[in-house]
Amino acid sequence: MYIGGFQKISLLDYPQKICSIIFTVGCNFRCVYCYNRLLVLPEFYPKSLSFFEIKDYLKKRKGLIDAVVFTGGEPTIQPDLIERMLELKQLGFLIKLDTNGARPEIVEKCIKEEAVDYIAMDVKAPLEKYKFITQVNVDTNKILQSIKIIKSFPAYEFRTTVFPGLSIEDYEALFPLIKEAKRYFLQECRLQNTLQDCSSLVPFSSKEINFLKEKASKFVDYCGVRG
Ligand code: SF4
């Protein structure tokens, strides 16, 4: 596993649990608003951290840390993702996967092999705008498949970064994709140091984001906003 970063403690990244975060290197998307160039662009890739050192660190903190989050980059492109998740699960940690949903077969395998306890998927745009946001050719059927698989899992959330390069109407067109989901979050977008220069864009106002929250709430059980 190519690991570009390790955050020892977070109180925010696994619902109601204290977690550590493993940041994997490499992504199959190039989202215009991505600020993780170290984990996304090969020319900036850092030297890999050792999974075994991280595992050793976690082993010594069992009881203090409840969960481990695999995020990226895009963790599902790591060939040994499930093996590594299971290693940490066997130590007694809850495991969360953050994914962009482009590889439903891996998400499904994580579930089948009981390697994961919580899944968070980014739903980036209405399907016809995926290419504009991700700057790659996305098989949007795979996005739909991932949504379907994740919805049948007990503990999950979908989330959308609200990027002002798309319109309010675009986001309204996205919400039916996650119809009847249990938990959904709208995330405010950072516009500095992004893969493409977004600094001239004007972020959505709180009023606009609240409007979107109201609209999204009609499709999902719970909708929240994250700053
Ligand atoms: S924001 Fe997009 S490019 Fe950046 S890590 Fe996430 S999926 Fe990959």
Image: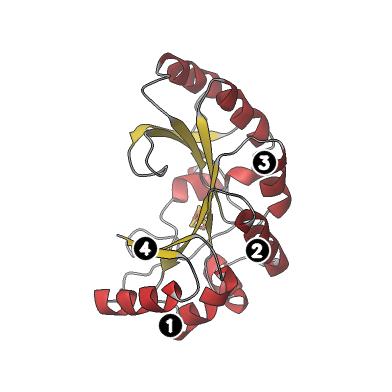
The residue to which callout 3 is attached is 110
Does label 3 or label 1 sit earlier along the sequence?
3
Residue 142 higher or lower than 166, as above or below: above
C-alpha gap between disc 3 and disc 4: 26 Å
Helix or strand or loop: what does disc 2 sit on?
Answer: helix
Is residue 105 toward the left or the right of residue 124 in the image?
right
C-alpha gap between disc 2 and disc 3: 16 Å
The residue to which callout 2 is attached is 143
Q: Residue at x 66, y 58 (%)?
A: 146
Q: Which mark is residue 224?
A: 4
Q: Nearer the viewer, mark 3 or mark 1?
A: 3
C-alpha gap between disc 3 and disc 1: 34 Å
Using a 10 Å C-alpha cutoff, classify the residue at mark 4 as few (fewer than 14 neighbours), some (14 to 19) or many (20 or more): some
Res 186 seen here: no
Helix or strand or loop: what does disc 3 sit on?
Answer: helix
Residue type, numbered disc 1: Ser
- The answer to the question of whether label 2 and label 3 lie on touching residues, with beta carbons closer than 8 A, is no
Using a 10 Å C-alpha cutoff, classify the residue at mark 2 as few (fewer than 14 neighbours), some (14 to 19) or many (20 or more): many
The residue to which callout 1 is attached is 167
Q: Nearer the viewer, mark 4 or mark 1?
A: 4
Residue type, numbered disc 2: Ile
Helix or strand or loop: what does disc 4 sit on?
Answer: strand
Displayed quadrant of residue 140:
bottom right
Residue type, numbered disc 3: Cys
Is label 4's Cβ within 8 Å of ligand 1? no
Q: Residue at x 37, y 41 (%)?
A: 16
Does label 2 or label 1 sit earlier along the sequence?
2
Say which quadrant the C terminus sits in: bottom left
Does label 2 or label 3 sit earlier along the sequence?
3
C-alpha gap between disc 2 and disc 1: 21 Å
Q: Nearer the viewer, residue 218 or 69?
A: 218
Q: Which mark is residue 98?
A: none
